[in-house]
Image (cartoon, rainbow, N blue to C red):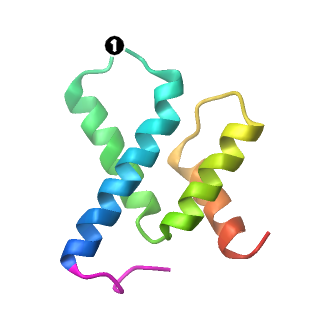
């Protein structure tokens, strides 16, 4: 887990990575009816949920979801997969 282990600059870069990962997941299910403000809130939810996990865990969880599922993931779905990856499953 990364919480508290990152410098301010590293935390900002990690947040940027998570935002990109989230966008890449939900972009497969883009909804043009969402305003930019709503999209920003959704991105913030993803960052808050996945911030404790390493980029490696998030990448692997994202890959597992894309390989196995056909519906839009929630942050909790990817968080559960991150816990599995972190535990070595």
Image quadrant assignment for residue 88 = bottom right
In-front residue for pair 55/3: 55
Is residue 73 among what the camera can see? yes
Q: Main secondary structure of the magenta part?
A: loop
For label 1, the residue is 33
Q: Position of residue 68 (x, y in %)?
A: 77, 39
Left or right: 48 with respect to 41? right
Of all residues, the one furthest to the top in this rendering is 33
- The image position of residue 7, as x and y in percent, is 24, 82
Question: Does 9 sit left or right of 45 as displayed?
Answer: left
Dot 1 crowding, Cα within 10 Å, few <14, some 14–19, many 20+: few
**Residue 59 relative to residue 2: left or right:** right
Residue in the image at 20% along x and 31% along y = 37
Q: Where on the picture, by quarter, is residue 70? A: top right
Give left or right: position of 78 versus 69. Answer: left
Residue 80: in sight, yes or no?
A: no
Residue 18 part of the magenta-drawn span: no
Residues in magenta? 1-7
Measured along the vertical axis of the image, is residue 86 above or below residue 66? below
Residue 43 position within the rendered picture, expressed as x and y whole percent measured from the top left: 34, 43
Q: Is the residue 77 above or below the residue 10 in the image? A: above
The residue located at (80%, 69%) in the rendering is 89
Q: Identify the secondary structure beneath mark 1.
A: loop
Figure check: 87 above or below 31: below
- Which residue is at 41% across, 50% downward? 46
x and y, in percent, of residue 5 in the image: 36, 86
Q: Write the residue at 32% across / 20% down.
A: 34
């Amino acid at each position: 887990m990364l919480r508290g282990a990152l410098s301010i600059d590293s935390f900002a870069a990690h947040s940027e990575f998570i935002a990109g990962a989230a966008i890449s997941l939900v972009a497969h299910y883009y909804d043009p009816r969402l305003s930019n403000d709503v999209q920003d809130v959704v991105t913030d939810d993803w960052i808050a949920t996945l911030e404790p996990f390493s980029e490696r865990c998030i990448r692997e969880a994202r890959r597992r979801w894309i390989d196995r599922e056909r519906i839009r993931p929630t942050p909790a779905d990817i968080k559960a997969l991150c816990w599995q990856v972190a535990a070595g499953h």
